[in-house]
Image (cartoon, rainbow, N blue to C red):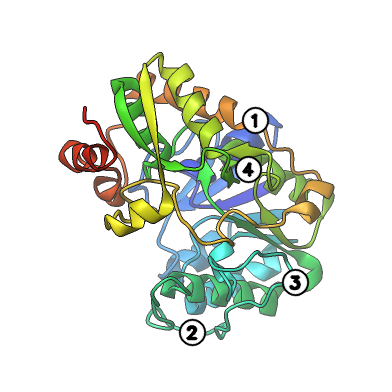
Amino acid sequence: MRLLVLGGTKFVGREVVYQALSCGWAVTTFNRGRSGEDPVGVQAIRGDRSVEADVSRLAECGPWDAVVDTSAYVPRNMLAVARRLEPVASRYVLISTVSVYAGWPVEPLSEDSPLLVAPPDAGPDFGEDTEDGPTQYGYQKAGTEAAVKDVFGSERTTVLRPGVVLGPGEYVGRLPWWLRRAAAGGRVVAPAPPQRSIQPVDVRDLAAFALRCVEHGTAGAFNVTAPIGRETFGGLLTACAQATGGDPEYVWIPDEALLEAGVRQWSELPLWRTFEGVWRVDSTPALRAGLDCRPLAETVRDTWQWLVETGAEQMHERAVELGLSPERERELLAMVGGSN
């Protein structure tokens, strides 16, 4: 199997490459070489997907049985890249996002839910951010979906829409923040109730499903999340304590109190968001097509091991915005009677 990965040096793309190599596939990567080193064993081609000459040079290195695209963000560029690669690639797997749904994050979602509307030739300025609703990122990714389908057609296109992706290599910093906070111990603010369902998917399971779709020629659009109701926020934080050996005392504060105190959802308390649709994404079609989601506790354990072994100092710029400061946490704990 000959595979082309657009990206391939960070998180999802890197995991796709590792697993493809372990299967004995011939893997080509295409990236600018700025986000990390390519895994040993790939044919690494340097270039910028926004530069026509670079993409044309890439196409000359084909053909490939499939492309896995982890770096598509602008519809117009996606359209140009797809057109250039279509003659030399049998199928296209696009890593998209649940943010393409018009109802995200407010409404429960399935693959039948309405999508945001974005033309396949939209430029980088198309779409807008709205409070608690669609984002420009969502519009842009919806446009990239439209672009690849426009070129490759429905039978040769696979679109994967993960929600939150966690696991070793996670540079955004959501799970790493909770792990480090659990390791520090003491009284820890946690969003009640602990029985709240959550659906993060492990990066390794997302990558494995992408390659399974390649191998089996599986077309269509799939939500890629853990099953609804299997994992909980309480389970996540318990796993963080167990993995780190820390001794945190979780202080579960209701949503209403956190909101009244002005705690920023998704950032000050990573993975906490109150909208019903955030963790009600139906992934039944993907599960039937072979998606296998490991227990969240395994993801937590392995992410902590990765943090300990690597230090993971090179986080995404957004990581600095994540988590409660010690001062802010003390304020919230005092609000419910107690402090660190």
Q: Residues within 10 Å of mark 4 (few under 14, many from 20)?
A: many
Q: CA distance from mark 3 to mark 2?
A: 23 Å
Which residue is labeled 4 in the image? 207
Q: In the image, 38: left or right of 333?
A: right
Q: Mark 4 or mark 2, which is nearer the start of the sequence? A: 2
Q: Residue at x 48, y 74 (%)?
A: 140
Question: Against 105, is 325 above or below?
Answer: above
Q: Residue at x 26, y 37 (%)?
A: 333
Residue type at mark 1 is: Pro
Number of marks present in the image shown: 4
Q: Residues within 10 Å of mark 2 (few under 14, many from 20)?
A: many
Which residue is labeled 2 in the image? 122
Residue 328 place in picture, x, y as percent: 19, 43
Q: CA distance from mark 4 to mark 1?
A: 16 Å
- Where disc 4 sits, the SS reads helix
Q: In the image, 285: left or right of 20?
A: right
Which residue is labeled 1 in the image? 295
Q: Mark 3 or mark 1, which is nearer the start of the sequence? A: 3
**Is label 2 in contact with label 4 (beta carbons under 8 Å)?**
no
